[in-house]
Structures are given as C-alpha cells and as structure tokens.
C-alpha cells in the first residue's frame, strides 16, 4: 500500500518547478496563437514574422493556414504534425513579461 502512495505523482510541485509547461493552445488569428501555461500565465504568440521571413526554415509548412491550424500541445510544448514545436520556456518568459511573444529570426 505504501509503495502505491509514494508512486503517485504530485502535479502541484511539478507546476512550481516548471511553470512554463504549456497546457492549452488555440489559433486566434492569422499566424497567432493563444497559449496558457501550467501556472495560469496566458498570452499570444505571433509567428507571422518568422513565417514570412526570407528563410522560415523548417517552419515554412506553417504558412499554409490549414497546417498552422493543426497546432496542439504535446509533452508540454506547442507542436504541429511532423515534429515542429516551439520552446515553451522562451515563450513563457516573454509572455510573463509582456503578455506576448513575437517569433522571428532572432528568436529561433
């Protein structure tokens, strides 16, 4: 009985250690997302500057609105099919400070 109790995960302490864990994401406009983190912090992420840069790199497929709309949360990160994802810790820091994150060449 004791082994089962100690194996149970305490999600409260996990939120304190990693507040940047993404818990929800939704498309809110042209190449913009609304992201909510485990500690309740919430804000917008604008990927337009990255996607329409001269070289969007691996993120080029997200220019297609249908592909962009397939966003979901996987392993605490904003993710798209094909393994594309965004670093949740960098998003969290910007959103916590300003309420938004603009993703461009300098923020990759």
Image (cartoon, grey):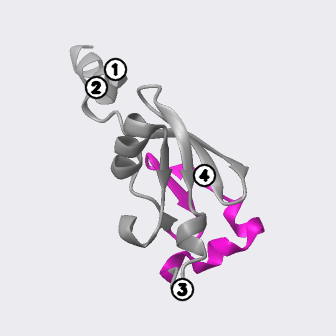
Q: Is residue 32 above or below residue 92?
A: below
| Residue hosting label 4 | 72
CB contact under 8 Å: marks 2 and 1: yes
Image coords of residue 85 (percent x, y): 48, 62
CB contact under 8 Å: marks 3 and 4: no
Q: Nearer the viewer, residue 91 or 49?
A: 49
Of pointers 3 and 4, the one earlier in the residue sequence: 3
> Is 80 colored magenta in this rendering?
yes
Which region is colored magenta?
57-83
Of pointers 3 and 1, the one earlier in the residue sequence: 1
Q: Residue at x 43, y 31 (%)?
A: 38
- Per the model, the C-alpha gap separating discs 3 and 4 is 26 Å
Q: Is residue 35 above or below residue 55?
A: above
- Per the model, the C-alpha gap separating discs 2 and 1 is 7 Å
Of pointers 3 and 2, the one earlier in the residue sequence: 2
| Residue hosting label 1 | 12
Residue 60 appears left or right of 106: right
């Amino acid at each position: 009985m004791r082994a089962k109790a100690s194996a149970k995960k305490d999600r409260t302490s996990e939120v304190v250690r990693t507040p940047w864990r993404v818990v929800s994401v939704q498309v809110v406009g042209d190449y913009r997302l609304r992201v909510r983190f485990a500690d309740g912090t919430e804000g917008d992420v604008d990927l337009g500057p990255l996607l329409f840069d001269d070289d969007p790199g691996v993120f080029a497929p997200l220019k297609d609105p249908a592909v962009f709309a397939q966003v979901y949360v996987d392993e605490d990160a904003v993710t798209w099919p094909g393994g594309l994802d965004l670093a949740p810790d960098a998003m969290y820091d910007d959103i916590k400070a300003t309420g938004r994150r603009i993703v461009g060449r300098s923020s990759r």
